[in-house]
Amino acid sequence: MTNFTARIAGVATLALAVLPVAALSTAHAATHPPVSVRVADIDLSTADGRSALVARTDAAAHRYCAGEVALDLKAACEAGVRSEVAEKARADIRLASRI
């Protein structure tokens, strides 16, 4: 029973550590206008198209996260933007392949 209690305490501690980060990103999203990355005019099946997507994503990440002062928060913010754009691009590609 002690091992089970220790595991629950460990998970609870991790959950509490994650909550402030989630709150920061939510507060950031509420105070900053959304950015968009246009992909309709590029062919993601080519190297040039993927390169254009990376460049546009980087520019959007820099714009969206420009207000972050702490370097670690800025890097995390930009990584989050890149991740979201990549996820949405993959979803669009899957949807287009079904048509």
Image (cartoon, rainbow, N blue to C red):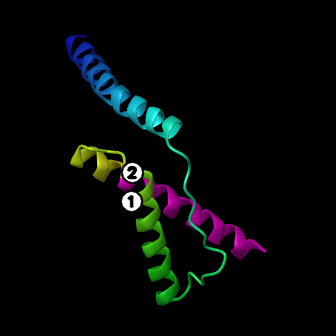
In terms of secondary structure, where does tag 1 sit? helix
If the image is split into quadrants, where does the N terminus sit?
top left
Q: Distance of mark 1 from mark 2, alpha carbons?
A: 5 Å
Residue closest to the eye, 85 or 8 = 85
Decide: marks 1, 2 in contact (CB < 8 A)? yes
Q: Which residue is mark 1?
A: 62
Q: Which residue is mark 2?
A: 65
Mark 2 belongs to which amino acid?
Answer: Cys
- Residue furthest right as drawn: 99
The magenta-colored residue range is: 78-99
Q: Quadrant of residue 3?
A: top left
Q: Is residue 41 above or below residue 23?
A: below
Does residue 82 show up?
no
Residue 42: x and y, percent? 60, 82
For the residue carrying disc 2, how many other residues have a C-alpha within 10 Å: few (<14), some (14-19), or many (20+)?
A: many
Q: Residue at x 22, y 49 (%)?
A: 71
Whether residue 46 is in magenta: the answer is: no
Q: Position of residue 9 (x, y in %)?
A: 26, 16
5 or 70: nearer the viewer: 70
Please name the amino acid that badge 1 sits on.
His
Q: Give the x, y percent position of residue 11.
A: 30, 24
Is disc 2 placed on a helix, strand or loop? loop
Q: Residue 13 shows which numbered tag?
A: none
Left or right relative to 49: residue 63: left
Question: Main structural element of the magenta stretch: helix, strand or loop?
Answer: helix
What residue sits 49% from the left and 37% below the top?
Answer: 31
- Relative side of 92 to 60, left or right: right
Residue 53 visible (yes or no): yes
